[in-house]
Amino acid sequence: MGGLFGVVTQDSCVQALFYGTDYHSHLGTEHGGMAVFGSKGFYNTIHGISQAQFKSRFVDDYKKMEGYFGIGSIDDESPQPLIFRSKFGIYAVVATGLITNKSELVGELLNEGASFTEMTGGGINNAEIVASLINRGDNIIEGIASMRGIIEGSICVLVLTPDGIYAARDKVGRFPLALGQSKDKNRNSYVVATEASSFENLGYELYRFLGPGEIVLLSSDGIKQLKPEGNQKKICSFLWIYTGSPSSIYDGISVERTRERCGSYLAKRDNVQADFVAGVPDSGVGHAIGYAMESGIPYRRPLVKYTPGYGRSYTPPTQEIRDLVATMKLSAVRQVINGNRMIICDDSIVRGTQLKNLTVKKLWDNGAKEIHIRPACPPLMFPCIYASSTRTTAELACHKAMRALEGRSVEDPSDYLDTTSAKHAKMIDWIRRDLNVTSLKYMAIEDMIAAISLPEDQLCLHCWLGK
């Protein structure tokens, strides 16, 4: 996963860049970076953030930086931004997403005489691949457009040049890019970000969202459209269910209000008796509040997140790190849990290991009487092929259940996709027993779509439907 932030201004951009990039820290845990352009030219700084928060790693760097245009990134796959000298001059690039045909593209570029210097864990940096593809074009604009046509997967890009920042959303808008302008109308300053929620506290207001495939140039003269949006949108549904910050909005739809609607839909289809509703902090909280409002069952907090220093347990690249984060960040409140029946809303069940071993176990160990799990999306059946989130089919809880039931790996899970089938019911019950909970009931996909409130044909539902 990852997030992008860019700012152009007529004075120093550095403070806005520093805090704006930091506002994307919930989207990744591995790499952070910033690059600026100013009177002294280009400068970039990159650090690993797996063992420290973004602010603590970059606070000394940002105090030394000078520039009036800047870009930053949080990314789990590639350290960025990178600076390149090209036929278009010097520029810096950040690119987040997933390139699924990476090896083929690298082979083509090597045959053309390209060379790659930025190696990350033995792999080639995505930003360097993107830059090499952009350099094929007659200019940066055409280079970006042709690059997106070649890449399989999904890539959003910011290119920092002496003219300003080129911003390009991926071709079908799977991931967002928002544009903002200074609240001070006498100040010509503009921002672009994955998370529109990063604008408010920095003195900016939302201007609009880039459309799928759209390319714009941000400069001190304003925001200029260079390529119009395409006619197909397939935005990631998981942005609202889990990935996004509760305070953010994507294509005009609030994350927090969507989660409340998810909880409401869960409650409408439920009849379980319980003493309270709770959400697994933090991303399950909005869903639980919606459930409580609809059902009239009180909302309480049996699990409390110890916030400082602990990010999301879903994003780290290894199960060992994910388990450690999940173990350390949640504290059980025995005085709330003991002797009570509880409905626990979570954003999803991906692998199931953390929910089982590090959440459910804490509730039982502290005297829970009943535990009813209510995920705010349908069973995840397919790994994401557009971002580095769920990585393999085998790790998904549904496929663990299918392997156990069938005695083999299930290549075609279509029989299990039918929510009215006996196989689907057996899969859900196997997961329930594996989690060791009283009951388990997933969200219906039609309810999730209704909660997001965009037309189904504008949403990417690949994780659930495989298409």
Image (cartoon, helix red, strand yellow):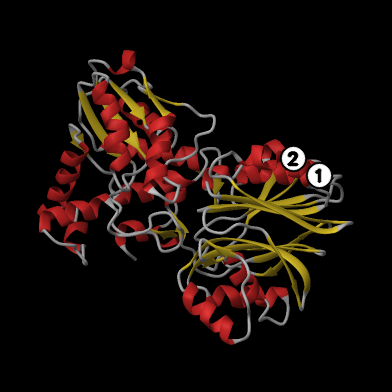
Image vertical order of residue 138 relative to residue 301, above or below: below
Image vertical order of residue 275 relative to residue 263, above or below: above
The answer to whether marks 1 and 2 mark residues whose Cβ atoms lie closer than 8 Å is yes
Give amino acid for label 2. Answer: Asp
Q: Could you tell me residue 437's position as x and y percent?
A: 20, 33
In the displayed structure, does residue 358 sit left or right of residue 136? Answer: left
Can you identify the residue that label 1 sits on? 64
For image coordinates 20% across by 29% down, the residue present is 272
Image vertical order of residue 195 relative to residue 340, above or below: below
Q: Which mark, residue 60?
A: 2
Q: Is residue 169 visible?
A: no
Q: Could you tell me residue 177's position as x and y percent?
A: 60, 55
In the displayed structure, does residue 220 sit left or right of residue 376? Answer: right
For image coordinates 65% across by 46% down, the residue present is 21
Farthest right residue in view: 39
Residue 392 is drawn in which quadrant? bottom left
For image coordinates 65% across by 38% down, the residue present is 55
Q: Could you tell me residue 263's position as x and y percent?
A: 35, 36
